[in-house]
């Protein structure tokens, strides 16, 4: 049986509804998964019209009620958008509040084992705030809704897997967070995420922070004082890990198959590597939770929302990756 994948439509004023519709109409998605859309029926019907897709909207209450054929979009309709005041490409509190409600429902389906994974579309931080939602992004929302204190972010593109030691903090703060104890903790938890995904062989590489990994203190002491001691202790504990390896080469080496994953030490270090390789097919996986979540790694694109311009490639890849990994995950139906 094809896995059930829940897709919350994101911020209705962004491109989420359009990439959802286009993905449902994609044959690869149909062949791989049974997609359960969570959103507003009126918004989805408008997106179908904009995208010119031949899809029938089927309102359901439970995933099992769906009609999973190539011409049907199955939706759990939360009916929370007033189309009289709705505008594409605008920050609206109504849309931020709605986007959170879609995620909340999708996570509830996953937590209750009614779907096998969640593949998310973009949300807008300003709209969340305008709607009174006190989270800065998907990762934090999923962490709260699954009772996971510090979810891990992993990117995957063309077999290259990248974890992040730090995420949404300043570059200055991220440098201060490169500590031996944090690296050890992250490698342990990243290893468990890889096991959840069925990846049990290979070596995890730790990227260097400074140019040439600091050249033994010539360009910084973080590698000498924090990274190398962490790697040595992890090896003594039995973890298959290497590093620090210069960030100018480690991602290339992982792409060639030398490493099964890379621990990037700050946000842009890993983002630049993966998105330069293939921007549209870089998919985010949130790990360390009791449920599986994949996501596009682009924003709401307010400037092109409602214009049938957006590419669905990233959303298609997110759904396919969710379908690929869901059989290996702990939350089997």
Image (cartoon, rainbow, N blue to C red):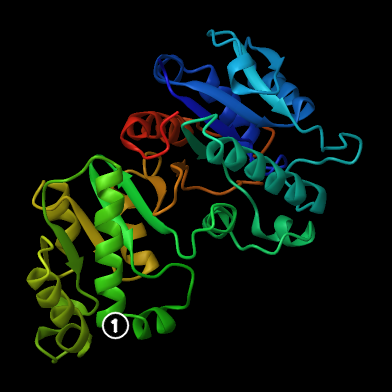
Image vertical order of residue 199 relative to residue 189, above or below: above
Is 191 situated left or right of 249 in this image? right
Q: Which residue is mark 1?
A: 179
Residue located farthest toward the right when viewing the structure as drawn: 84
Residue at position x 69%, y 27% from top? 76
* The C terminus sits in image quarter: top left
Q: Nearer the viewer, residue 82 or 100?
A: 100
Please indicate, yes or no, whether residue 47 appears anywhere in the rendered image: no
In the picture shown, does residue 230 fall above or below 33? below
Q: Is residue 46 left or right of residue 263?
A: right
- List x then y, in percent, for residue 11: 68, 44
252 over 228 or under it: above or below: above
* Image location of residue 332, percent across then percent down: 41, 32
Quadrant placement of the N terminus: top left
Give percent across and percent down for residue 319.
44, 31
111 up-or-down from 51: above or below? below
Near-viewer residue (137 or 4): 4
282 relative position to 110: left or right:
left
Q: Residue at 30%, 67% (x, y): give it.
A: 186
**Residue 141: in sight, yes or no?**
yes
């Amino acid at each position: 049986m094809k896995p059930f994948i829940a897709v919350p439509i994101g911020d209705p004023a962004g491109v989420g509804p359009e990439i959802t519709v286009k993905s449902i109409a994609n044959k690869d998605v149909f062949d791989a998964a049974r997609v359960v859309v969570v959103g507003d029926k009126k918004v989805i019907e408008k997106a179908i019209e904009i995208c010119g897709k031949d899809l029938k909207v089927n309102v359901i209450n439970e995933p099992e009620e769906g009609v999973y054929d190539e011409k049907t979009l199955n939706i759990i309709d939360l009916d929370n958008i007033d189309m009289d005041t709705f505008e594409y490409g605008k920050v609206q509190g109504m849309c931020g509040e709605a986007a959170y409600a879609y995620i909340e429902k999708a996570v509830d389906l996953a937590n209750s084992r009614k779907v096998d994974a969640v593949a998310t579309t973009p949300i807008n931080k300003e709209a969340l705030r305008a709607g009174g939602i006190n989270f800065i992004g998907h990762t934090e929302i999923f962490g709260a809704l699954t009772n996971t204190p510090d979810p891990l972010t992993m990117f995957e593109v063309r077999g290259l897997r990248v974890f992040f030691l730090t995420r949404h903090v300043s570059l200055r703060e991220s440098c201060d967070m490169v500590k031996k104890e944090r690296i050890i903790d992250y490698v342990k938890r990243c290893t468990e995420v890889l096991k959840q995904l069925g990846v049990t062989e290979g070596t995890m590489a730790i990227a260097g922070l400074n140019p040439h990994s600091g050249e033994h203190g010539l360009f910084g002491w973080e590698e000498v004082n924090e990274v190398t001691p962490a790697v040595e202790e992890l090896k003594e504990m039995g973890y298959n890990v290497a590093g620090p390896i210069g960030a100018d080469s480690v991602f290339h080496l992982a792409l060639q198959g030398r490493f099964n994953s890379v621990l990037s030490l700050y946000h842009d270090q890993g983002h630049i590597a993966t998105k330069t390789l293939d921007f549209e097919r870089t998919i985010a996986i949130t790990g360390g939770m009791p449920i599986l979540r994949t996501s596009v790694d682009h924003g709401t694109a307010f400037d092109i929302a409602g214009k049938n311009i957006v590419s669905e490639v990233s959303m298609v890849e997110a759904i396919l990756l969710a379908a690929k990994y869901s059989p290996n995950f702990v939350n089997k139906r």
